[in-house]
Amino acid sequence: MNQLPENTWGILLVFTNIVLFMGLAPFFDGIVRRVTARVQSRQGPPLTQSYFDVLKLLGKQNIDSVGILPFRMAPLVALASILVVIAILPVAGKATALTGYADTLSLIYLLTLGGVAVLVGAFASKNIYALIGASREMTTMIMVEPILFMILMLGVLKTGSLDLTTVIYGTPTVNYGWAGVVMVIVALFGLQAFVARQPFDIAEAEQEILGGPFIEYSGPNYALFKLYLMLKQMFYAYLPIAMFVPLLKSGSFIVDLAMQMVLTAVVFLLIGLLSATHPRFRIDQALKYFAGLFVVALAAIAGALFG
Amino acid sequence: MRKELEAKLKAQLQDDVVCVEKSDERTIFVDVKRESVREASKIVTKSGARYLNSIGYDNISRDGTLGMIHAFAYDNNNQFVCVRTSAPESDPVMDSITPDLPSAGWSEREVYDLLGIKFAGHPKPKKLVLADDWPDGIYPLRKEVPHDLVPQGAEDVAYQLDEAPPGTKIVPVGPFHPSLHEPEHFAVYVDGETIKGCDYRGFMTHRGIEKLCQTQVSYNEVPFIAERICGICGSVHATAYSQCVESAAGLIIPRRAEYIRTLMLEIERIHSNLLWLGVAGHLIGFDTVFMQAWRVREQIMWLCERLTGNRKTYGMILVGGVRRDITPDIADDIRNVVKKVEEELMVIHRAIEKDSSIHKRTKGVGTITRDQAIEWNLIGPVARARGVDIDARRDHPYAAYDDMKFEVPVLDSCDVWATLVIRVIETFEAIKIIRQCLDKMPAGEIFVELKDNIPPLRHAISVVEAPRGESVHYVITGEENRPERWRVRAPTFQNLQAVPAMLLDEQFADFPIIMGSIDPCFSCTDRVAVIDLQSGKSSSVTKAELERLSRKTQERA
């Protein structure tokens, strides 16, 4: 009899997570847009603009420009994969009903699946700009995913467990040692790449390849991709907060959560500032940057292992 | 100068040289038989002249020939040389000079398209200006073709692109692409992300402004049409045209008018350089530079509106002078605005100067050597960024530039970064020139009327340094109070031809900024009317009001 309410609580948390992320991601996107605008001496759109963008796209005609299944499926798979990531995420230290069925590795797989869906959509588009965008996206993924993996790996090494809740919340910050400090820096320097913002919006590069992988998408299909991108962005902004900033432990779930969200908003402020003050890198320049980051992250892992 | 050149030409070409004459202090005309046109061009180039432009004209009604002029400039002693020749209508063939001077390629292709002169030995005798479905045998610039001829279109005719190098993919850029601001088409051949070649098909918006002005309007109306050739450097074209006509008519305009022309040209330079700086920022994905540069530029636009009634397309330049005087009040206004612009630009300049990420995207990008730049005849900031020290304001002074003290920045890193630095420095120099103009401006008239008819068939050439390079105008005076031939060569016409060389082996991601670095003005190149559609602002509406209104409209929508 005890298990039923616990499970209900867990199932409720799955929905809370999804509602929370779906509800806040466009708002955080709005923050980035507003910050960028202010840096550029513009007034900028209202903070709610990104909600309207998605809604408007959802209401438009769905143009299937190539007429093959992978093209239509790609946005659905991308959105579904990120939603599952969110569903298994122990937000504010509370595992959901699904967290137990997944571990750190499946989290990484699911994130990669979303990226692969974007690639499939791009290749299905049969558009040269989409192809260039896809090849850039692929190169970026190959370089950036391992860095993310190593950030999570640090938690795995410190806790000796693959369980998500343990990995993310299990290590008190002090126990991370210098390797943890290095990893926080890696996470910060990789932030723009994780969220694909300037200087790393290379795959979309509007001025060269007109949105790259998404060029053939419009209407609801594009809305799904937009939503996917915003959710992914929020996940990547939230992850370092969850991992490296200790929970408030106020005893109230709501207060802990609110604190984390405020901090996530701060991360988005940072994203906005960084993207407004950088030009876009070329892919070859970005690769050098990632390679450097990769080596540093590897050193931190080594430090955690033997240090 | 004339005697030396004449001696050289006579020694090598003997009887093929028909005549060498000097029309005014700075223009030498060399008439040669068509067999020797390539030789004569070689001799002139060897004697240190820089190729400017080629002009074809229809002379069939007079002596049954088609005329061809190759214009050159001696930058060291302010002289122009025009090598003239002609070919009979029945056999309109002459040697191409493109094998010696690659930058003449487009001029000759244009002359073939519009007048039907064939150039033997041209390396790429493809269509340049005319539409792909334009019928053969109709040459629009010939006199018998009416200005409003609309030939029957044809289906299934397309431009044949150059063959792509093996192992490359074609990335089509344009006719509509965010890094081009006007309709033009580039086929970029890429291997992975590396550019291996490029073909260009432009002139999609050619409206035949030259033909219009040669058949429909009179001398005094052309400046306003000339101004509409370009949405950015309108005064440049109006000034260059007016100077041609004044030179042909022997008209001396008041000194004050020359000062006001200089003033307008420099104000235009500030606005154009800031516009370009913003666009360059946008093209490397740095929109903050874009927004800030355009915010600073906006003050210049408002200033021009107060000065002339228009943000752009000032309508200030007339044949014989200028239309509006500069009152002391306006002079103060200009001083205040340029001071503010100077301060704000300094802030941007300092920010850009040390920004390592901008360096990353611009240093070593779009590199061609100084020798290539000379070979391709680059002009303006693009040339000066590659160590070629030319500036028409200093080398061929016009308007009041002989009274002005200014630096001509020249850098030798041969890349986009150097171009950027040069254009920023030139903006500061423009501000210096504006201050000198206002301080030294003499009193007097601003306009002198053209009273007598201009004798027909006089030739005149004039160059004006536009913000993006020198514009060359050539006028042959006509009998009906309008030019018999008016040829405009905008700076992009020259610089664009060298872009494939700049793009070679660069990354595709750098395509927008390399393309953008020459500040391409396709409308100038096409000679089309581009009009700023940003008017509609009535004087009874204040700025705040307008802002409120526009926000309100958006809320409703």
Image (cartoon, coloured by chain):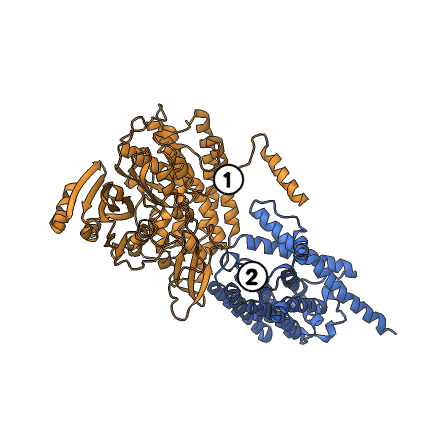
Chain colours: A blue, B orange
Q: Which mark is residue A126?
A: none
Q: Element under label 1? A: helix
Q: Residue furthest right?
A: A1
Residue denoted by label 2: A215
**Residue situated in front as seen by the camera: A169 or B169:** B169
Pointer 1 with pointer 2, Cβ within 8 A: no
Q: Please identify the quarter of the rendering in which residue B314 is found.
A: top left
Q: Position of residue B82 (x, y in %)?
A: 23, 44
Residue B293 vs B446, above or below: the answer is below
Identify the residue shown where x is 56% and y is 32%: B538
Q: Chain of mark 1?
A: B
Observer able to see residue B398: no
The CA distance from mark 1 to mark 2 is 33 Å
Residue A121 appears left or right of B476: right
Q: Position of residue B399 (x, y in %)?
A: 33, 34
Residue A37 vs A174, above or below: the answer is above
**Residue situated in front as seen by the camera: B268 or B21:** B21
**Residue situated in front as seen by the camera: A136 or B123:** B123
**Residue situated in front as seen by the camera: B178 or B352:** B178
Residue denoted by label 1: B298
Q: Chain of mark 2?
A: A
Q: Quadrant of the C terminus of chain B?
A: top right
Identified by mark 1, the residue type is: Glu
| Few, some or many residues within 10 Å of mark 1 (<14, 14–19, 20+) | some
| Few, some or many residues within 10 Å of mark 2 (<14, 14–19, 20+) | some
Which label sits in the foreground, 1 or 2?
Answer: 2
Observer able to see residue B524: yes
